[in-house]
Image (cartoon, grey):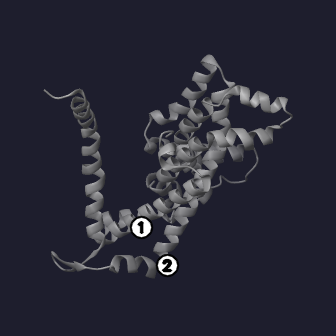
Amino acid sequence: MPSDAARSRLLVGLLLAPALLWLIGLVVLPHLELGVLSLRARIAPRQYEPSLAQYRTFFEEPLYWHTFARTAVMSVLATALTLVLAFPIAWTIAKIARGRARSLMFMLCLIPFWVSETVRTLGWMILLRESGVLPALLVSLGLSAVPPELLYHDATILVGLVYTSLLFMLVPLIGALDTLDDSLIEAAYDLGGNGFDILRRIVIPHAAPGITAGCIVVFMLTLGNYLTPTLLGGKNSLWFTEQIYTQFITRFNWEQGAAFGFLLLALSTVIVWAGLRLAGQRFGDVMSRA
């Protein structure tokens, strides 16, 4: 008869089996296949040879690496703007609001995410297009002689990315700030501390795991976003996921698309690692907050 330890291990194995199957079947194996695709070149129908031609194409074509760098910079900027916007909201929900007001505020942040990203992005298009609500309002207020075209700008893309990512920054921030003992802040005020010093020495260090977790999630979602930059930025969005889509779907060049996918994965890994080093956080601690 199996011992208690053996039964415990068997139970843990059964509980982990679905997650392991999901991880291996939907993450590990597809990435291995993409890796094989990115390291081969087609020399004839159904004939391939090992090659790094796809990666050379990326560095030799200015459009590709310019789009790659632009996507990275815009994703970092969108993540920073999301953090700046989400932090005071999270502080209000976690430390100021009480009872029903707290629940209502969190619900108001949650409601937009009850509909799909497509619907939310199309809503921004209705608001910002030349014949939309906001340009007409600017004309009626006398702030513009003709309806301005507010779509297809970098600022519009950033607005859409921040809006679609806000909740994923709020949740870890609220969780981190909720565990901050109010007595620490009161003691800091009693000892003569001002608001800025308390924020810098107490609040931010305590919320650092939540801040880092939120930034990682938002950055990954933003970097891999396809719909929002394409709809709000138009043909000139220059987002790298659009290049990947073009290679796979439009040109049927799976080898080049796989190489682009791995380059994007390498970029996200490097930036997340650099962010963890700068924040002085460990990945395991951060993911426990996510």
Helix, strand or loop at label 2? It is helix
Looking at the image, which is closer to me, 85 or 5? 5
- Relative depth, front residue between 59 and 94: 94
**Image location of residue 246, percent across then percent down:** 36, 66
Say which residue appears at 73% left-offset and 52% top-offset. Answer: 144
Residue 263 numbered tag:
1
Residue 117 percent across, percent down from the top left: 45, 43
Label 2 packing within 10 angstroms: few (<14), some (14-19), many (20+): few
The answer to whether 27 appears left or right of 58 in the picture is left
Q: Which label number is shown at residue 62? A: 2
Q: Give me the residue at 49% from left, 47% from top.
A: 217
154 versus 160 height, above or below:
below
Residue at mark 2 to residue at mark 1: CA–CA distance: 15 Å
The image quadrant that residue 148 belongs to is bottom right
- Looking at the image, is mark 2 or mark 1 earlier in the sequence? 2
Mark drawn on residue 133: none
Residue 195 in view of the camera = yes
